[in-house]
Image (cartoon, rainbow, N blue to C red):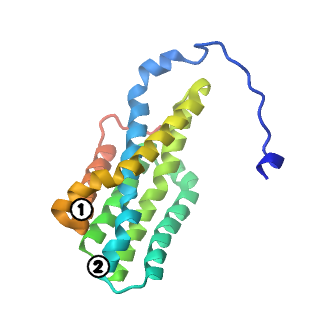
Amino acid sequence: MAIRFINEPNIRRRPSGSFNLKYLKEAPALVLLIYFTAFFGFLFFYITPMEIPFILNSKTSVSTTMVGISLSISILMGSIVAFQYARIRKLISYRDIYAISFFLMAMGYAVISFAEVYAVFLTGLILQGLGTGLLMPNSNLWLVNIAPAGIRGRMIGNLSFFVYMGQFLSPVFFNPIAAVAGPQGGFGILGIFMLIIAALFLFSKTKKSA
């Protein structure tokens, strides 16, 4: 279907330096903010599918099917809220969306850290999924809107690099925390980290409604 329906655009070679070099000098901090926010967001997110099956097996007597359902519901919630992203973006800024995203993830991880029964774990995963669903579309759209056309593809590629590096380093980051606080306690510590990130976005002095 891709071969049949997706047309290859004509590539027009631009002379070197034809994009706005001034932009790269004025806005690197904002670009790095988006990159590292996506990095940490997916570093935190990937701990859920990595650790939740083991935590559920140790804390509850649910079947492996129910474990799979719990993770699927988290992803489903993310898909639903991502589908509503355009409406949300019309009401609030990119920074506010990041704040809401990390706040929901923090609340989800806090619930998981205290959960003892399956229903409570499920509540935490739903909250976490709702927060994660806002993370990727917000990063993509904000970056696309500020990137010069000449290097937009390169910058989106860099964003993908940071996302996948976050996922790759997730166990490396979490294992020392879990070794000290335990897997569930580790979720609580990460919840505190994400709550701090949410507060920084919400109360930033440089906050803009862009």
Residue placed at 54% from the left, 54% from the top? 85
95 or 39: nearer the eye? 39
Splitting the image into 4 quarters, where does residue 191 fall?
bottom left
Which residue in the protein does label 1 denote? Answer: 186
Badge 1 density bin: few <14, some 14–19, many ≥20, Cα 10 Å: many
Badge 2 density bin: few <14, some 14–19, many ≥20, Cα 10 Å: few
Residue 199: where, in percent of width, then height?
28, 49
Residue placed at 17% from the left, 63% from the top? 181
Q: Is residue 72 left or right of residue 205?
A: right
Is any part of residue 84 visible from this angle? no
Q: Is residue 32 above or below residue 58?
A: above
In the picture as drawn, the residue positioned furthest to the left comes out as 180
Splitting the image into 4 quarters, where does residue 63 fall?
bottom left
Circle nearer the viewer, 1 or 2: 2
Which residue in the protein does label 2 denote? Answer: 58
Element at label 2: helix
Residue 177: where, in percent of width, then height?
21, 57
Amino acid bearing label 1: Gly
Residue 147: where, in percent of width, then height?
54, 30
9 or 34: nearer the eye? 9
In the picture as drawn, the residue positioned furthest to the bottom comes out as 61
N-term mark: 1 or 2: 2
Amino acid bearing label 2: Ser
Residue placed at 40% from the left, 33% from the top? 32
**Tag on residue 135?**
none
Q: Is residue 120 above or below residue 173?
A: below
Element at label 1: helix
